Amino acid sequence: MKLLFGVPALALAVYVFASTLPEAPTGFDNKTNGLVDDATHAADQAKFDEIENVPDGLGPLYNGQSCRECHQNPTSGGSSQVSELRVGHSDPKGKFQDPEIPINRGAEIIKGRNLVNDRAICPNAAFPGTEIQERVPDSERIRTFRVSVNLLGDGFVEAVSDQTFVELAKEQCKKNHNKICGQVLYVPIVEAPGTTGVGRFGWKDQHASLLSFSGDAYLNEMGITNRLQPDEVTNLCNTVSEPNDTPGPDGLGDIDHFARFLRATEAPARDDQLATTPKARQGAELFDKVGCIQCHVQTLTTASAGTKINGGTFTISGALAEKQFHPYGDFLLHNVGTGDGIVQSMTEHYGKKMYQITWRNLSIPAYESTANKIRTAPLWGVRLHSRLMHDGASVTLLDAILRHRGEAEHVTEKFQKLKPSEKEALLEFLRSL
């Protein structure tokens, strides 16, 4: 089977013509990729950057006061060193269970989520005796941090067809004789009840839609209820009417502006000066040779203009259509030996009513199989990350490479067999991304 840029040629005709398709625009200049005009993009970014306060609906439990707070390096929409805490425990049969977090001196128990918020709005002057800060009980022995992910360029990721990822996973598994097999996970499209899509956003591929992703983060990271996530985590200390996020004069809520902003961002740009050096070029060849390219796929392409995605709620326009981009990631779930044992909570990510809906292609066993799997970290912009891997526990590129086990163990072994000068060349290539 012919491979193009490390991607199976059969995976759709778009791969075959990848070299002739226009490049997705790149940069860190806060310019639009063409989906909207510059003024609209700037206004959407202002919403993304806006600081939320208690009168706006912040909390009662939260992690940050703006989207930018967790996605800001080197500009709005990028990654950051900010991490979130997730916990849980295993039942007697070894099955992951979400935690039960007591608040208000045990008067209320937070259930149905494995995220533990770091901040709370109470006690305060209005509720001086209400103690709602979440703390992890000793019973929750499964614990991990997850660093905030880069969101720049995700409009192009969203515009890749589901079938592209399905075929990529099949070919990957076949080519590697079942040693490397990325998992495709079908997840709910919250704005299109009953519809699912191939997950690609978040460390567990928990979302396929940027609007679903935005609604999830607005509630669970900032405590702002919205039309997709209308239920507060706790009603203690809550005095703001629901949902907190209501449509403005343009008919759009904050989550609509967030999603449009992300869809219109440029993809992360490379360090062009470093990328053209002989050392970095050699490193790129070695990156392919040892097998890193099998999961860190260089090039993907987007679907054609007019294609309806996300249950028909979004149509791919010319600005996003038939573009090639270079994420150095397959956006699939893999076990590379760093999994945290956590299975994502359905109610946390898709709302408390998600079990009242019949979702096409949704498989609970498929979710449960992801406990020790993590989405391949796209390497575009990795030179701008100070903490690496899903938990941020690796602080050098070499550390991150050597942590790869499981499906990637034989690739790590090939890297270790390289000459010192070759290892350094490969690392130089990564520094150019």
Image (cartoon, rainbow, N blue to C red):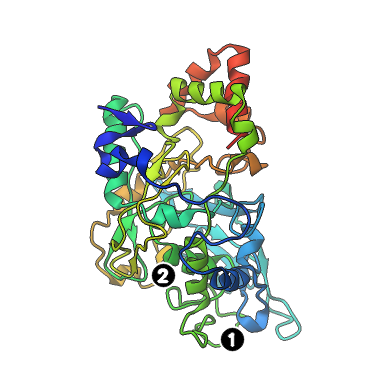
Residue 167 location, quadrant: top left
Is residue 269 among the parts visible in the rendering?
yes
Q: Which amino acid does label 2 sit on?
A: Gly
First-in-chain label (1 vs 2): 1
Query: Which residue is rendered at x = 54% and y = 69% of the image?
Result: 218
Q: Residue 35 — which label?
A: none
Residue 345 location, quadrant: bottom left
Left or right, 300 with reference to 154: left
Q: Position of residue 5 (x, y in %)?
A: 39, 32
Is residue 332 among the parts visible in the rendering?
no
Separation of residues labelled 1 and 2 (CA atoms)? 19 Å
Q: Residue 351 — which label?
A: 2
For label 1, the crowd category at 10 Å Cα-Cα, with few meaning under 14, some 14 to 19 and many 20 or more, is some
Provide the secondary structure element on which disc 1 rests: loop
Answer above or below: position of 4 versus 420: below
Left or right, 165 with reference to 156: left
For label 2, the crowd category at 10 Å Cα-Cα, with few meaning under 14, some 14 to 19 and many 20 or more, is some
Point out the image quarter for the C terminus.
top right
Provide the secondary structure element on which disc 2 rests: loop
Q: Nearer the viewer, residue 205 or 127?
A: 205
Q: Which amino acid does label 1 sit on?
A: Val
Q: Position of residue 226 (x, y in %)?
A: 48, 77
Residue of label 1? 240
Q: Which of 247 and 144 is in front in this view?
A: 247
